[in-house]
Image (tube, rainbow, N blue to C red):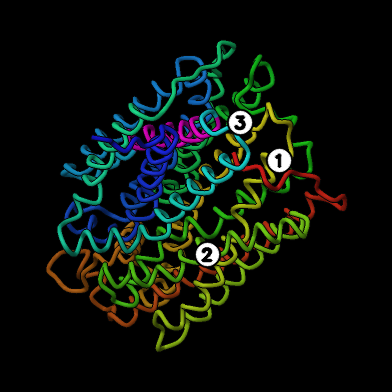
């Protein structure tokens, strides 16, 4: 009997695609179930922000260190370890019984996810070396990763509708087992004997800086901006960032080699990389809340509505690559950011009408997705192609760190803007004697849809004068501010990126994908 033998490279590619699918789903499937998590875990608005931010901040903490660890101890070995960590922490997320437990589990899951992401790139780079095969492998990886991001909202909404929220996380246990078997049978072991140094100081100080800034943005207004606690946390955050800059200056092999910022194509693309996460991706956290809280859609309908926002990110990248072949990245990347900004402005206009619906939001969602598709691939190709081959890994790490750091910070910023926009309407509708802390707590509840205008408690009595129409207007107003911020931020990033590129044609290898 003759058995069909599957080539090891095909099995390795299957493993990489499965793990990239899991990573993408954990970013985009969770936002659509946040309202469900609010109800079953009794989470408030800040808990919902941290459920997302814990994952992204944890990813950032391990991105740069993972490459060195994989080179030193073996890429296959570390890949296996990261998949096990991701599977086990997904189990912890799925059985979480409270918001703090889920936030802690999400942080641990982000550690596994961030490390797993870098291992994917390392395995692809080592195992696929021939030009055409390498290009196809990275293209397939990108398509599957984008599919996870693009279809995550409808998958998350469908799982909640057909089963329960636990399976949004528990499904990764099954996928992790299959991925482990693929890695064991298809991935070759490899290491770099010269990889000895781990920039531990840089990793710790940068992580604390990002965490401190996100904490200040989310918790600062409640603690009081001038309070001793807020000032102390700000001082510690600033001290950690200064320590990070010093550590990278004196390190033998720094995590961030700031000299690459003098390469204008690299810096211009890096601005574009961060610019996407000042607008498109952090709004993924809040758009499901808009569809459910403002438009009253179910989880499944909200997930279907989000397809208009995410599907263009899968369709447009091939067109973006053709544009890169014909034009300079200094034109393509700013144009993509400008299109994202245009999409946000159209969403803002579509949300203002009395008959707002997914149809009025559709043009803006499509333009924002098209802009992301025009920006994402050119940014990756430019950051890695603008530096020498032996520095491409470091350049890719800086690019990915810039994305996740800006994402974590802007999840917090958009949440703050949403609350402040709601407060403007509530302050106009309520007497000036209203307690500020109670008012802010009510605004946070409005963000999640978990509020009551009637009851016997003092808080309910204080807001009994409000109507549901006024609260709905406040929520619409807050989201309007967020959409305006996203549009203005994207346009500002487009201008800054174009200025950073300068007038000299950017000479990069647009075909490089690692």
Q: Which of marks 2 and 3 precedes in the sequence?
A: 2
Q: 316 or 289: nearer the eye?
A: 316
Q: Is residue 269 above or below residue 428?
A: above
Which quadrant would the C terminus be assigned to in this image?
A: top right
Give percent across and percent down for residue 334.
71, 59
Residue in the image at 33% along x and 47% along y: 51
User: To which residue does mark 2 refer?
Assistant: 315
Crowding at dot 2, Cα within 10 Å, few <14 / some 14-19 / many 20+, comes out as some
Q: Residue furthest right?
A: 504
Q: CA distance from mark 1 to mark 2?
A: 23 Å
Question: What are the residue bounds of the magenta stretch?
Answer: 107-125
Mark 3 vs mark 1: which is more N-terminal? 1
Corner quadrant of residue 433: bottom left
Q: Position of residue 23 (x, y in %)?
A: 39, 44
Picture quadrant of residue 31: bottom left
Toward the left, the furthest residue is: 456
What kind of element bears circle 3?
helix
Q: Is residue 419 left or right of residue 320?
A: left
**Residue 230, above or below 253:** below
Q: Which mark is residue 385?
A: 1
Q: Is residue 142 magenta?
A: no
Q: Which residue matches tag 3?
A: 393
Q: How far apart are the alpha carbons under marks 3 and 2?
A: 27 Å
Q: Position of residue 4 (x, y in %)?
A: 32, 38
Residue visible at 42% across and 55% down?
149
As rendered, which of 481 and 137 lies closer to the eye?
Answer: 137
Q: Which element carries disc 2, helix, strand or loop? A: helix
Q: Nearer the viewer, mark 3 or mark 2?
A: 2
Q: Secondary structure of the magenta portion, mostly?
A: helix
């Amino acid at each position: 009997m003759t058995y069909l033998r599957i080539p090891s490279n095909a099995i390795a590619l299957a493993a990489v695609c499965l793990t990239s699918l899991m990573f993408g789903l954990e970013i985009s499937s969770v936002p659509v179930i946040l309202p469900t998590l609010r109800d079953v875990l009794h989470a408030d608005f800040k808990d919902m922000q941290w459920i997302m931010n814990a994952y992204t901040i944890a990813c950032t903490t391990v991105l740069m260190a993972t490459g060195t660890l994989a080179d030193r101890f073996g890429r296959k070995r570390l890949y296996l370890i990261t998949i096990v960590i991701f599977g086990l922490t997904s189990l912890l997320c799925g059985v979480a019984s409270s918001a703090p437990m889920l936030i802690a589990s999400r942080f641990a899951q982000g550690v596994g996810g961030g490390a797993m992401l870098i291992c994917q790139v390392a395995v692809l780079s080592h195992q696929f070396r021939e030009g055409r095969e390498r290009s196809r492998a990275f293209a397939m990886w990108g398509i599957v990763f984008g599919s996870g991001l693009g279809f995550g909202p409808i998958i998350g909404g469908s799982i909640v509708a057909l089963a329960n929220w636990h399976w949004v996380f528990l499904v990764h246990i099954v996928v992790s087992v299959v991925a482990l078997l693929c890695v064991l049978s298809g991935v070759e072991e490899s290491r770099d004997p010269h990889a000895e140094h781990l920039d531990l100081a840089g990793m710790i100080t940068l992580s604390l800086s990002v965490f401190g800034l996100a904490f200040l943005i989310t918790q600062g207004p409640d603690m009081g901006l001038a309070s001793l606690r807020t000032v102390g946390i700000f001082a510690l955050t600033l001290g950690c960032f200064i320590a990070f800059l010093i550590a990278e200056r004196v390190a033998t092999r720094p995590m961030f080699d700031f000299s690459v910022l003098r390469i204008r194509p690299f810096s211009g693309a890096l601005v574009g990389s961060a610019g996407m996460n000042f607008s498109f991706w952090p709004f993924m956290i809040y758009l499901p809340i808009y569809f459910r809280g403002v438009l009253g859609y179910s989880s499944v309908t909200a997930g279907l509505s989000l397809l208009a926002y995410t599907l263009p990110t899968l369709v447009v990248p091939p067109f973006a690559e053709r544009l890169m072949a014909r034009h300079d990245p200094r034109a393509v990347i700013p144009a993509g950011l400008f299109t994202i900004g245009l999409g946000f402005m159209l969403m803002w206009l579509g949300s203002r009408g009395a008959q707002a619906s997914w149809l009025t939001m559709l043009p803006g969602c499509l333009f924002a997705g098209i802009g992301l598709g025009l920006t994402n691939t050119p940014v990756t190709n430019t950051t890695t192609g603008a530096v020498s081959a032996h520095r491409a890994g470091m350049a890719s790490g800086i690019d990915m760190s810039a994305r996740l750091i800006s994402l974590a910070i802007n999840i917090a910023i958009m949440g703050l803007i949403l609350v402040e926009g709601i407060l403007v309407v509530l302050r106009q509708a309520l007497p000036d004697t209203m307690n500020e802390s109670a008012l802010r707590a009510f605004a946070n509840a409005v963000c999640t849809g978990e509020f009551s205008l009637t009851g016997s408690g003092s808080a309910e009595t204080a807001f009994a004068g409000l109507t549901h129409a006024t609260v709905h207007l406040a929520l619409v107003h807050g989201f309007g501010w967020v959409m305006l911020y996203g549009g203005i931020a994207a346009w500002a990033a487009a201008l800054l990126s174009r200025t950073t590129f300068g007038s000299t044609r950017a000479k990069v290898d647009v075909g490089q994908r690692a």
